[in-house]
Structure formats: structure tokens, C-alpha cells
Image (cartoon, rainbow, N blue to C red):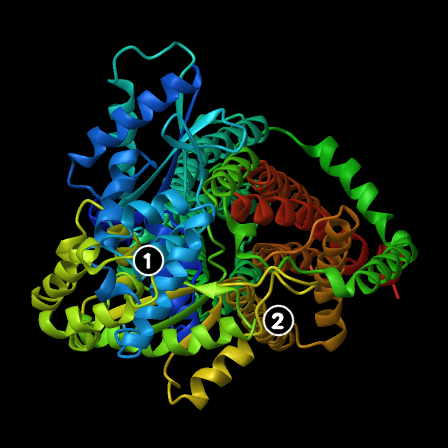
């Protein structure tokens, strides 16, 4: 076969590679799970995405100090907190130290009448004052008697105590040596809220390094003292580092495996290098296509790219082995292009996915495989010597042909295996899928355990349930939060929810502050009402002068603003729930379950939504983050199943048009279906629930296995005995590279990669075996 214009061919190829290198040099690579969020989320899904990107969940870093005794851990905690507070990369640092708690108490006490929901016109009447002062006196004999006695001259109504009880009622870590500590007392605790968005992995990485460096430079640390950290941003950074290291490790291992296999077969360094050209070209063009199409490339896409080494090299293997003995490659290339088309049809289902991560995989695969096939078709013939000399594999080919010749006798065994596999799938039909997005996370079990321990020690409230609203500015946001809070307070009284948090609890809207100031009496009226309310109470008005002074100070002061909270832990609370975005403000109000009864850990969100609707607040979104993440996975699964179904129909249509025979088409498709069913059964019987990546892997099994089935069908219909043996040998070598590279991927620490690798390696191997048994007709069948 002649290949016209070889210089033009090489020029176009080299120019394409140069362009790809230039694009890749400017490409941004990411490694968080944002690519596996929907590209067009609904309102509730968008709230989940926002939380994973920039919400309180994404910005909190939990810090633990271990080693030494409790005194040293407390000292290290205080010194670390003091150092970190001097930086500008944190909104707040909490460690439960006395100074920080005193600032919180001072803020609550000084502004009690602006913050307290009991600052009402009824409270500041003679009757209301008499009742509240009487209650305060009665409480002097209780557990809080000493505190009440000290506060009574300035707060006879008990407003400050009620506020302190409200916020101390929130789950708080245990305190040891004046700072937060774990429940077993063996770990000092700190909580950091970062200024950087959780989606800014680079900034979060620098923040984590800053924390570690600040700890390392504290003098006088014992040798066994160490710092541990967790939280969404820490996990995100760890995930990125894991993915990057895994991609490098697996790419190197896959490349070495392929090199060794090809050297064994070729015994030629030149042919080895030529065989890798389609792979390298496909990878470069694939990354370039994703970069141009999406503006960034996910690390998972690069990890997936290592598998291209095993699949794209198949084309050169077919080419070299068959060229070494065939007189014409025209029929060979017709089969190759049909295989490429079937692979594209399968990967196209990923490309059209509504999830960017899957779309990237689809675009990468399509562009990479097309490039690999084109380079094999037009570039390799120009660079390859006219006479290809390979290792003499005749004896191996003859033995292999003898085995395959008798493989068709095992069709009964395939039938039995399929019945068993189908039974296993049916028996596990209700438990096939893992619905948690966390199944895609690459964090280790040790990291998961540390995260759970720190959250438990912190007494972190469950962030599963959330009410959220948006507003054009901060004032309207707080006003709407107050309206929602009134509804939620009623739901709490009715035991529908256990409670809630809101930024408006510590930073009321200006309108509400003005309304509370308005009910406070002026100096003359306040004194008269106090005199009257103290009748029959053993306290003189003169002792409560501080109370009268504070009322007038509150009346005269300007409304509270966010800056008034600087230096308090309450500022962190507000900033985590009142989030300024590009065009609006987002208010988050975590909802707590009652914790009572068999369903006490759950909340009936339908009742919450109905309460908001009946009070004219329909725009408030109520979300179960766990349920929503499960919903996203279900959407993944449904979409990919649907698209995969279309892909399989297109593949079948292509085969039917090309092969012009329904029986041949079914014979080509049969081994692919058998491989998919078998792999699914093996995974289930191994106790592995399928993730979305297993489904992608099964799609790859169809794409890769179609090449095997097509070649077996081709050799059964045409070609000499020598050609048949060459084809079979090339299929075995190609299968070894595919199974090997995907098999290495199966040992990855990243579940997304290991799920695909383990699925495809087993599936590709079984697809070859089933193709040999089912697709190829025996010689005695052909003779009739």
C-alpha cells in the first residue's frame, strides 16, 4: 500500500503535537470533586454545590494537637491560636480559651436588649418587669445563683442569662486546662475558618501549610507532639495530592508494563518507540481537546488517560503483527475503523452527559482514540521500515490457533456461566448501587476516621439539614432570616425540629434593632416603672441604677453591624451563615433534629416546607444534604444508563450496517453482553456495590471488547490460515497490554480510577475469551 505525501503527513502530525504542547502548557489542572457535580443543578443541588465550594462546610478546618501532657497541649493550643490570629488568611480561630469566651460574653451582655427576643413592649411594662425580676430572684437559689447575683444589679430581667444559655446550649467541646479538648482529653482542639473559598484548592493548601509551619516553630515542644487536621478543605487538598501522585505512579507503571510486553514481542527498540507514538499523540490531543472544551482538565481525566496507553497501543500492535505477514491490509483497516466507530459511539454517551467529569472523560477518549488510529494509519507506515522483522511467533501462533479452534465447544459452559451470573444480579437487584458521592472520594480510611473523631470531639452540629434563602443585600437577608426564624421557632416548640441556627440570632436586622430600641422606655419612664414594679420585692431601685443606665445606653447607641463582632467567635458563626456572593447574599440556617424517639435523628422536611409556604415564605429552600447527594448519584446513574443504552443501540446499528447480517451482528455483540454481565456478577458476589465509575468501566468493556469480536468475526469469514493466526496473536498481545494497564489502575488509591481499572481489566479479558468462544465459527462449521 502506498502512502502519498509523506512529508505533508509528518508535517501535519508534528504541527498538531506542537500545538497540543502549547495548549497544555497553559492548561489549568484541578482535582476536586466539583467535576462530578451536575453542570446545570436545580436549586437544592446548587445549594449543595455552593456548600462544597464556598460554604461553611468547605471553609472549616478542624485542628488537633496530640502528644505531651494536658498542660503542654493547652499551651501549644493558645500559642498556635494567637499566632494564627495575626494572619489575614482566617476569618476566625476558636480554641475555647478564656479570653475568646470573655469577648463573646461581653458582646452578648452589652447588647442583650438588641439581641434578646424578649425585648418586647410587654416585657418593659410594670407587670412585665415585676414578673421577670421576680423570676430572677427565684433563680438565685439555683445552679446559676452566683452568676445571677453578680449580674442582677445590671440585668434584673435575666436577659443576658437567657442569651448565654441559648448559645451555651449549642454543642461545645470539652474544656481542659482552659482550652478545648477531645472527650478523652488526649487531644487539644482548635477550629479555623478560612478566608479563602473552599474551591480554591491552592489557597487552602497554602493555609494548611501556614498552620503546620506555625505549629512547627512553637518553641519548647515535646518530641511526640504533633498536629492533625481535617475538614472539607483539608480533604480536598489531600485528594488532589493523592490524585496527582497516583497519576504519576500509574502512568509510569503502565508505560513500563507496555514497554516490557512489546519488547518481548517485537525485540526491536525502534518498533517499540513507533508503537508508542499513537499513544503519546492520542494523550496530547485528548488533553488539548478537554482543555479547549472545558477550560480546565480534571486529574481524574489524566488518570483515566493512563488507560489510553493500554487501548491506543492496540492499533499499532494489530498493524505491526499483521503487516509482518499479510499481503494486504485493506480488510484490516476496514475492521479497525469499524472498531473505532463503535468505541466512539460508546464514549459519546459520556460526552453528552450533564456532569462535566463524565463529559471530560468522553471527549478525552473520543479525541484520543481517533488520533491514535489516524497516527497508526498514516504516520506509522511512513516511519516504519518496509520489511518489518518481528520475533518468530509461529509456534505460539499455531498452539494458540489449536486452542481457539476448540473454544467453540465451550459455548455450553458460557451459557451456564451466564445463567449463574444473571441469577446473582437478580438476587442482588435491590442492593446493586452505592448511592453515596463519598464513594468517589480518594481519602483513606485513616483520614475518614480522623475526620469523624474530630467532628465528634468538636461536638459539631449535624449539617445534614439546611434552610436557605437569598437576598439582594445584607439587611434584607437578615430580615428574611428573622421571618424564617419565627416559623422555625414555632416548629421547634411543636417538636418538628430540635432547633436551628441563624445569623440573625446574633446580628439582628437594623429594622428589628430599631424596633427593640423603640420599646425601651426613656429615663424618666423607666425609673417610674421600675419603682412601681419593685413593690413587694426586697430590692431597692438604687441598687439597679446600672440597669437603668444600660437601657438608656441601648436606646442611644447606633445599630449593631458585623464589625462590632470582630474578635468574637460569634463573628465566625455569622460569616459561616451569612455569605456574600457576587450578586446577592446567601443565608444558611442549619436545622437540628429532636434526637427523641425512633425517628429523632431525622426531620420531616415536608412539614418544614409546608410551614414556610403557609406563612408566605415559599422561596426558602429546605434541603437534606445527604438526600440531595444521593439524588445527584441517582441522576448520574439514570443519565449514564440512558446514554449508554443509546450508545449500545448505535453500536449495534453500525455493526448491522457494516456486517450486513443480523446473525453476525448478534454474534459480535454476544461476547460483550456476556462480559458485562459476568463482571457485574463478580463485583456483586465480592460484596462490592457499583458506583457510577463501574458503569463507565462496563461501557469501556463494550468499547474495547468490540474490537476483539470484530477481528474474530473477520477471520472466521475471510483470510488465509496465516492471516488468521497473525490476527489472533495480535489480539492476545493487545489484550495483555489493555488488561495490564487497566489492571494497574485497579490498584489505585483513588476509587474513581480503581473502579474503572478493576472493571475494565476483568471485562476486557473476559470479552476476549467469550469472543473466541462465541464469535468465531469452528472450521467444521465453515465447511458446510
Per the image, the residue denoted by label 1 is 538
Q: Evaluate whether residue 257 shows in this view.
A: yes
- 4 left or right of 327? left
How many C-alpha atoms fall within 10 Å of the one at disc 2: few (<14), some, or many (≥20)? many
Rendering coords of residue 633 (x, y %): 55, 64
Figure quadrant of residue 417: bottom right
Distance between the Cα atoms at labels 2 and 1? 88 Å
Image quarter hosting the C terminus? bottom right
Helix, strand or loop under label 1: loop
Q: Report the side of 162 relative to 575 (left or right).
A: right
Image quadrant in which you'd find residue 616: bottom left
- The residue positioned 43% from the left and 54% from the top of the image is 139
| 366, 421: nearer the viewer | 421
Q: Residue at x 25, y 60 (%)?
A: 112
**Callout 2: helix, strand or loop?**
helix
Nearest to the observer: residue 747 or residue 67: 67
From the top left corner, tell me how far across and down residue 569 is, in percent: 28, 47
Displayed quadrant of residue 113: bottom left
- Vertical arrangement, residue 586 with respect to residue 79, above or below: below
Residue situated in front as seen by the camera: 36 or 443: 443
Report how many numbered discs are placed on residues in the image. 2
Comes first in the chain, label 2 or label 1? 1
Instruction: Mark 2 and mark 1 in contact? Answer it, CB < 8 Å.
Output: no
Residue mark closest to the camera, 2 vs 1 = 1
On the image, the x and y values in percent for residue 262 come to 54, 32
Look at the image and tell me whether residue 364 can be seen: no
- Is 670 positioned to the left or the right of 511 in the image? right
Kindly identify the residue that appears in the image at 53 percent across and 56 percent down: 437
Return the residue at label 2: 648
Pointer 1: residues within 10 angstroms few (<14), some, or many (20+)?
Answer: few
Q: Position of residue 445 (x, y in %)?
A: 57, 37
Seen at 57% across and 30% down, the residue is 261
Amino acid at each position: 500500500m502506498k502512502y502519498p505525501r509523506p512529508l505533508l503527513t509528518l508535517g501535519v502530525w508534528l504541527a498538531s503535537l506542537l500545538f497540543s504542547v502549547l495548549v497544555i502548557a497553559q492548561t489549568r489542572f484541578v482535582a476536586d470533586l466539583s467535576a462530578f457535580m451536575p453542570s446545570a443543578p436545580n436549586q437544592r443541588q446548587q445549594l449543595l454545590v455552593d456548600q462544597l465550594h464556598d460554604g461553611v462546610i468547605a471553609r472549616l478546618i478542624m485542628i488537633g494537637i496530640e502528644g505531651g501532657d494536658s498542660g503542654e497541649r493547652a499551651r501549644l493550643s493558645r500559642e498556635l491560636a494567637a499566632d494564627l490570629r495575626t494572619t489575614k488568611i482566617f476569618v476566625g480561630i476558636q480554641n475555647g480559651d478564656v479570653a475568646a469566651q470573655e469577648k463573646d460574653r461581653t458582646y452578648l451582655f452589652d447588647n442583650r436588649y438588641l439581641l434578646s427576643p424578649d425585648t418586647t413592649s410587654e416585657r418593659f411594662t410594670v407587670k412585665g418587669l415585676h414578673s421577670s425580676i421576680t423570676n430572677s430572684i427565684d433563680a438565685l437559689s439555683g445552679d446559676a445563683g452566683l452568676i445571677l447575683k453578680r449580674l442582677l444589679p445590671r440585668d434584673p430581667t435575666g436577659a443576658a442569662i437567657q442569651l448565654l444559655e441559648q448559645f451555651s446550649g449549642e454543642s461545645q467541646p470539652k474544656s481542659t486546662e482552659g482550652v478545648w479538648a477531645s472527650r478523652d482529653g488526649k487531644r487539644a482542639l482548635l477550629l479555623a475558618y478560612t478566608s479563602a473559598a473552599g474551591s480554591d484548592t491552592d489557597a487552602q493548601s497554602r493555609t494548611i501549610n501556614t498552620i503546620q509551619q506555625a505549629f512547627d516553630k512553637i518553641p519548647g515542644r515535646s518530641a511526640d507532639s504533633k498536629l492533625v487536621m481535617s475538614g472539607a478543605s483539608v480533604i480536598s487538598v489531600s485528594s488532589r495530592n493523592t490524585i496527582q501522585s497516583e497519576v504519576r505512579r500509574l502512568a509510569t507503571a503502565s508505560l513500563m508494563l507496555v514497554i516490557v510486553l512489546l519488547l518481548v514481542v517485537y525485540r526491536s527498540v525502534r518498533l517499540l518507540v513507533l508503537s508508542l507514538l499513537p499513544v503519546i499523540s492520542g494523550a496530547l490531543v485528548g488533553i488539548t481537546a478537554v482543555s479547549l472544551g472545558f477550560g480546565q482538565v480534571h486529574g481524574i481525566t489524566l488518570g483515566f488517560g493512563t488507560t489510553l496507553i493500554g487501548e491506543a497501543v492496540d492499533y499499532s500492535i494489530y498493524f505491526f503483527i499483521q503487516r509482518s505477514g499479510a499481503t494486504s491490509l485493506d480488510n484490516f483497516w476496514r475492521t479497525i475503523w469499524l472498531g473505532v466507530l463503535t468505541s466512539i459511539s460508546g464514549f459519546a454517551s459520556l460526552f453528552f452527559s450533564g456532569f462535566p467529569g463524565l463529559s471530560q472523560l468522553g471527549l478525552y477518549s473520543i479525541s484520543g482514540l481517533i488520533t491514535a488510529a489516524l497516527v497508526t494509519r498514516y504516520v506509522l507506515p511512513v516511519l516504519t521500515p518496509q520489511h518489518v522483522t518481528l520475533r518468530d511467533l509461529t509456534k505460539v501462533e499455531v498452539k494458540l490457533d489449536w486452542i481457539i479452534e476448540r473454544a467453540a465447544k465451550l459455548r455450553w459452559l458460557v451459557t451456564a456461566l451466564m445463567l449463574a451470573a444473571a441469577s446473582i444480579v437478580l438476587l442482588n437487584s435491590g442492593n446493586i448501587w452505592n448511592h453515596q458521592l463519598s464513594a468517589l472520594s480518594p481519602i483513606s480510611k485513616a483520614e475518614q476516621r480522623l475526620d469523624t473523631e474530630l467532628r465528634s470531639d468538636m461536638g459539631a452540629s449535624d449539617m445534614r439539614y439546611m434552610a436557605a434563602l437569598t437576598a439582594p443585600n445584607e439587611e434584607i437577608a437578615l430580615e428574611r432570616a428573622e421571618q424564617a426564624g419565627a416559623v422555625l421557632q414555632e416548629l421547634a416548640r411543636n417538636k418538628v425540629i430540635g432547633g436551628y441556627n441563624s445569623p440573625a440570632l446574633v446580628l439582628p436586622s437594623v429594622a428589628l434593632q430599631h424596633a427593640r430600641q423603640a420599646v425601651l422606655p426613656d429615663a424618666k419612664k423607666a425609673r417610674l416603672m421600675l419603682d412601681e414594679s419593685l413593690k413587694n420585692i426586697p430590692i431597692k431601685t438604687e441598687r439597679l441604677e446600672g440597669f437603668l443606665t444600660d437601657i438608656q445606653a441601648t436606646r442611644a447607641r447606633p445599630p449593631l453591624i458585623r464589625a462590632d463582632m470582630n474578635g468574637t467567635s460569634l463573628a465566625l458563626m455569622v460569616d459561616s451563615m451569612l455569605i456574600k456572593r457576587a450578586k446577592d447574599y446567601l443565608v444558611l440556617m442549619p436545622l437540628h433534629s429532636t434526637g427523641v424517639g425512633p425517628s429523632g435523628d431525622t426531620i420531616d422536611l415536608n412539614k418544614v416546607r409546608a410551614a414556610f409556604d403557609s406563612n408566605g415564605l415559599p422561596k426558602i429552600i429546605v434541603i437534606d444534604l445527604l438526600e440531595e447527594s444521593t439524588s445527584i448519584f441517582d441522576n448520574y446513574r439514570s443519565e449514564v444508563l440512558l446514554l449508554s443504552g443509546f450508545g449500545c443501540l448505535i453500536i449495534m446499528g453500525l455493526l448491522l450496517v457494516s456486517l450486513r447480517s443480523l446473525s453476525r451482528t448478534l454474534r459480535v455483540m454476544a461476547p460483550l453482553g456476556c462480559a458485562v454481565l459476568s463482571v457485574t456478577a463478580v463485583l456483586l458476589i465480592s460484596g462490592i456495590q457499583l458506583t457510577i465509575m463501574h458503569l463507565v468501566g462496563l461501557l469501556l468493556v463494550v468499547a474495547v471488547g468490540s474490537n476483539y469480536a470484530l477481528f474474530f468475526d473477520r477471520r472466521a469469514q475471510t483470510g488465509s490460515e496465516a492471516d488468521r493466526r497473525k490476527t489472533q496473536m495480535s489480539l492476545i498481545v493487545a489484550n495483555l497490554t489493555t488488561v495490564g494497564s487497566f489492571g494497574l489502575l485497579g490498584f489505585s488509591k483513588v476509587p474513581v480510577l480503581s473502579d474503572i481499572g478493576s472493571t475494565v481489566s476483568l471485562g476486557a479479558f473476559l470479552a476476549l475469551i467469550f469472543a473466541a468462544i462465541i464469535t468465531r465459527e469452528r472450521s467444521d462449521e465453515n465447511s458446510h
